[in-house]
Image: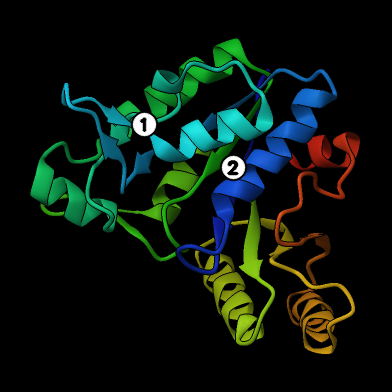
Amino acid sequence: MAKGLFVTGTGTDIGKTYISALLLKRLNEAGLSCAYFKAAMSGNERLPNGELIPGDAKLVKSVSGIDQPLATACPYVYERAVSPHLASRLEGGAVDMAVVREYYARLCEEYDYILSEGSGGIVCPIRYDERVIMLPDIIKALGLPCIIVADSGLGTINSVVLTYEYMKAHGIAAKGLILNRFHRGDAMEEDNKLMCGRLTSLPVLACVGEGDKDISLDADTLAALFG
């Protein structure tokens, strides 16, 4: 039976996609059957023929080396780089939870490990009209444990703790933290690592520096995070 893990973050543009790519690269290199999933993806390139290319999925595929077809990675792909609820209002195609579940279920039939990535931070409206779907609704619908990706710099203690507390209040399990853009030996960032762990009681699973091509998390430990 397939197992899943959800990658959320403390905000937009903190590196969730690249971290997801490195995690899948680790699993793929260990010979494990793995795939990428993102329910709603905004800010994508439109080709002259009108086709939208799911950019995050393309990056993950390129970095990780997985052979998953791009078309299976994301049911909702939008051009504008805005929250999915607004992108769908402007472009059409509002997210339907039944479709999200169906896409995810298909991946579970073909792969053993499914890594899902969220849109934006944990408080992200996916749909907001006559129906309301927030990012935690998708996490719960898929029944996934989470890891939190955060930037390593100034302000991350506040962002990490607020994200963790929001998740806890909404019944979402977090299994650990990954700090991105980490500068080893930097006094502030080393202290951020220490304090984020202490204030959330979560393990810091890995620290990823700018340009790192691998993640310091072995495949067995990573696979054990999936639920």
At horizontal 73% and vertical 75% (from top left) the residue drawn is 200
At horizontal 46% and vertical 40% (from top left) the residue drawn is 56
- Mark 1 Cα within 10 Å, few/some/many (few <14, many 20+)? many
Where is the N terminus found, in terms of image quarters? top right
State the residue position of label 2: 144
Q: Is residue 156 above or below residue 69?
A: below
In the drawing, what numbered circle is on residue 221?
none
Between 157 and 166, which is closer to the camera in this rendering? 157
* Residue 144 appears left or right of 129: right
Between 11 and 143, which is closer to the camera in this rendering? 11
Q: In which quarter of the image is residue 115?
A: top right
Does the image show residue 21? yes
State the residue position of label 1: 100
- Mark 2 Cα within 10 Å, few/some/many (few <14, many 20+)? many
Mark 1 / mark 2, whichever is N-terminal: 1
Q: Residues under labels 1 and 2: Cα distance?
A: 14 Å
Q: In this view, does 41 lie above or below 149?
A: above
- Name the amino acid type tagged 1: Val
Element on which disc 2 rests: loop
Expressed as whole percent of the image width and height from the top left, the position of residue 227 reads: 70, 37
At horizontal 31% and vertical 27% (from top left) the residue drawn is 99
Q: State the count of labels.
A: 2
Expressed as whole percent of the image width and height from the top left, the position of residue 55 reads: 41, 38
Q: In this view, does 194 lie above or below 166?
A: below
Expressed as whole percent of the image width and height from the top left, the position of residue 180 reads: 69, 63
Q: In which quarter of the image is residue 175?
A: bottom right
Element on which disc 1 rests: helix
Between 192 and 124, which is closer to the camera in this rendering? 192
- Name the amino acid type tagged 2: Leu
